[in-house]
Each structure stands twice: as structure tokens, then as C-alpha cells.
Image (cartoon, rainbow, N blue to C red):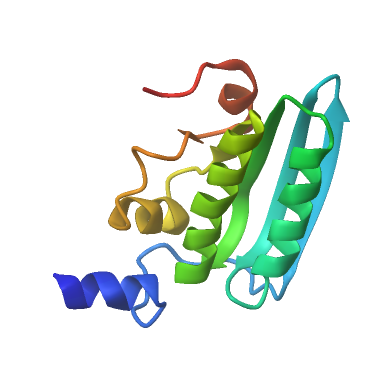
Amino acid sequence: MERIYRSIIFGMMPMAAPVTAKRTGLQISQQHQDRQMLLVAEGKLTVTTISQMEQAVSSALRSGASSVVLDLSGICDADASGIGLLVKMYDQAFHRGVDLRFVVPPGRLAELIELARLGHILPLFPDQRSALTQSPPV
């Protein structure tokens, strides 16, 4: 089991969910309304793109927003460094008193988060609407 876990986390094992479009890099857009900010990420969350993600989220956390929603539904590939960054960003938000929520629909990214046993730690939502309107899952 450990070997399978490590293979999936480090991207050495193909996943069941096919990727429909091959994307390179990472694109992040943002929308700000009142004291809530929505960041929408598309592309890869890997060692080559985490600095871009970290910069965007850190900026959002410093913006004065009381709530930041990070929509990761457009992420087509992730590795262990990307998953680790989610935990780091959540910790930073917690220490700043900002409510950081993650939109992670069922799929490869959700599987990686569960394999890393982080599903009960990170506030995950299946879609933007629930992340923007509901209380964090217990």
C-alpha cells in the first residue's frame, strides 16, 4: 500500500480519471467582492508552479479579505509539493485569521488529498457555490 501511495503522490502511476486537455503552467484569476476573494486556478499544481500559487494566495491573504476561496476545479495535475502547499497556505490563513476554503470536486486532486489524509484537515467543498455560502465542513 505504501508503494502505491508514494507512486500516486509523486505522479508515477496513471490515474483512472482522464485529462481532457493537456495544459502547461498555471493560470490564476481573481474576483474580489466586499471582504471575500475568489481565486480560480487552472493548469498544474506541481513543483514548477507552486511559487506562482503561493504568491497569489499570499497576496489574497494580505488583501484584507476575511474569506478567500481557492477554486482548484481546473487543476489537471498535482504532485506532492502542490499538496504540501495547500497545507502551508491553510496554516498561513489560520494564523492571519482568514477563512481559506478550497473547491476540490471529485477527481484526481481530491484523491491525492485523501491519500495524504488531509481531507479532514482542509476545508474542502465540491463547488464554488457551497464554498462561498456554506459553513466549513465539520
Direction from residue 131 to residue 123 in the image, left or right: left
Kindly identify the residue that appears in the image at 51 percent across and 69 percent down.
Answer: 81
Furthest residue to the bottom?
12
Q: Nearer the viewer, residue 121 or 72?
A: 121
Classify residue 44 by image quadrant: bottom right
User: Can residue 95 be seen at all in this image of the molecule?
Assistant: yes
Please identify the quadrant where the C terminus is shown. top left
User: Can residue 101 be seen at all in this image of the molecule?
Assistant: no
Q: Is residue 5 above or below residue 127?
A: below
Kindly identify the residue that appears in the image at 78 percent across and 61 percent down.
Answer: 27
Q: Residue 61 at what x, y percent from top left?
A: 74, 40
Kindly identify the residue that appears in the image at 78 percent across and 32 percent down.
Answer: 37
Q: Residue 109 at what x, y percent from top left?
A: 46, 56
Kindly identify the residue that appears in the image at 56 percent across and 39 percent down.
Answer: 103
Classify residue 128 by image quadrant: top right
Please identify the quadrant where the N terminus is shown. bottom left
Q: How many marks?
A: 0
Direction from residue 112 to residue 101 in the image, left or right: right
Q: Nearer the viewer, residue 35 or 104?
A: 35
Direction from residue 30 to residue 99 in the image, left or right: left
Q: Is residue 18 above or below residue 107?
A: below
Classify residue 111 by image quadrant: bottom left
Q: Residue 21 at what x, y percent from top left?
A: 64, 69
Furthest residue to the left?
1
Q: Residue 6 at what x, y percent from top left?
A: 29, 75
